[in-house]
Amino acid sequence: MDASFFNFDGKIKNFDMLLKELMEMLEEAAPFSLQESYDNSGLQVGSPSASINSGLVCLDITPEVIAEAREKSCDLVISHHPLIFKGLKKITGQHFTEEVIIEAIKHDIAIVSVHTNLDNMLTGVNQMLCKKLGMKNLQVLEQQSGLLKKLVVFCPNDHAEKVRGAIFKEGAGHIGDYDCCSYNIEGKGSFRAGDQANPFVGNLKELHFEPEIRIETIYPAFLEKKILNAMHASHPYEEVAYDIYPLENSFDRVGSGMIGELEEPLFARDFLDLLKNRLKVPVIRHSELTSQPIDKVAVCGGSGSFLLDKAISSGAKAFVTADVKYHQFFDARKNILLADAGHFETEQFTVNLLYDVVNKKISNFALQISEVNTNPVHYY
């Protein structure tokens, strides 16, 4: 690292950046377009053009977290749960949400939330929970569909490798554990350049046939802009011929919940002991204990009881989530061990995940994890 980043005492200086630059980095890690329709992830308070130099990461935003940010001279708070979920008709400070907004604006503290878009990522909240439970062979439990598109682009034979490489670099061509996936067909393209054209090959007003390769590949829709920019930049033609098709294929890297395997099968009581130990939770609400060994486990950090049927049909022997309603425990019965380990408890490691996401991208940005316990649920 350059010496200019250090003070005379050897400590790293605060690193100024624009808030919109941080937002772009978060967009790359967990695209905001992947959030659920009810969600409100993104910039909650602050101007994208504001300069920031230090941040605080938390699960929930409370007045105590804003006070901590002020005490630590942080001008940014990154939370998992959004501060604002529904429209506000007035901001008078009567509710804690309004109080937080007033204090944040008064002290120039920006607030950014990264919620269900992070939940829905393969490398997001649920993977973190699975790793804490020592699980392996992880897969998204309920994969999303309609997120993939097919790109077909035609280019001269000699430039096909360059174009393929450019779009692969930006994220096209991933299928499961394989990358650089494409289908290529050789043929001939025809065109006639007009008076104002500047053709790469051929002459003005003359019909020209050029040996070309048709390259087909797939990509997630949220990467479209970057992939098309790379395609245009690497392609020799003045006018690039390409097609885009929507696909209904499921996308194995995005969706709700996660499923995997334990290192070794456990009986129900032993599995619940594992949960209590790893999540440090004082009590677990659960369905009737099953007699079958638990080897395959489904999880969904936070409110994930809507995935119960999916967890059962997937062959999981246990499902770990939170906010389970009374009658849903009947639905589990002897089909699966349903364990409600608490909303906060199943998402508590998200702050570490958010910290790592930012720190890996901007290692010299002053970032801290909040010391405030924001769990609103207490146990007696």
Image (cartoon, rainbow, N blue to C red):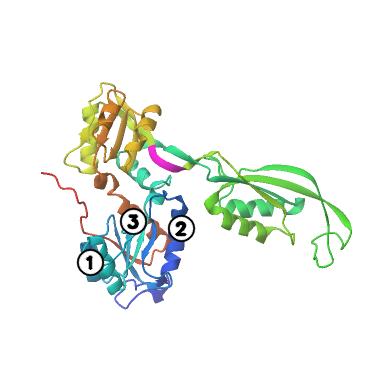
Which image quadrant for residue 363?
bottom left
Residue ranking furthest to the left: 380
Q: CA distance from mark 2 to mark 3?
A: 22 Å
Image coordinates for residue 347, horizontal then vertical, percent: 29, 47
Residue ranking furthest to the bottom: 8
Image coordinates for residue 341, horizontal then vertical, percent: 24, 39
Q: Is residue 247 left or right of residue 54?
A: right
Label placed on residue 93 = 1
Q: Is residue 193 left or right of residue 5?
A: right
- Residue 254 in view here: yes
> Above or below — where is 78 with respect to 140?
below
**Cβ–Cβ under 8 Å for marks 1 and 2:** no
> Above or below — where is 316 with respect to 217?
above
Image coordinates for residue 315, horizontal then vertical, percent: 38, 27
Which corner quadrant holds the C terminus?
top left
- Residue 107 in view here: no
**Cβ–Cβ under 8 Å for marks 1 and 3:** no
Q: CA distance from mark 1 to mark 3?
A: 16 Å
Which residue is label 3 attached to? 86
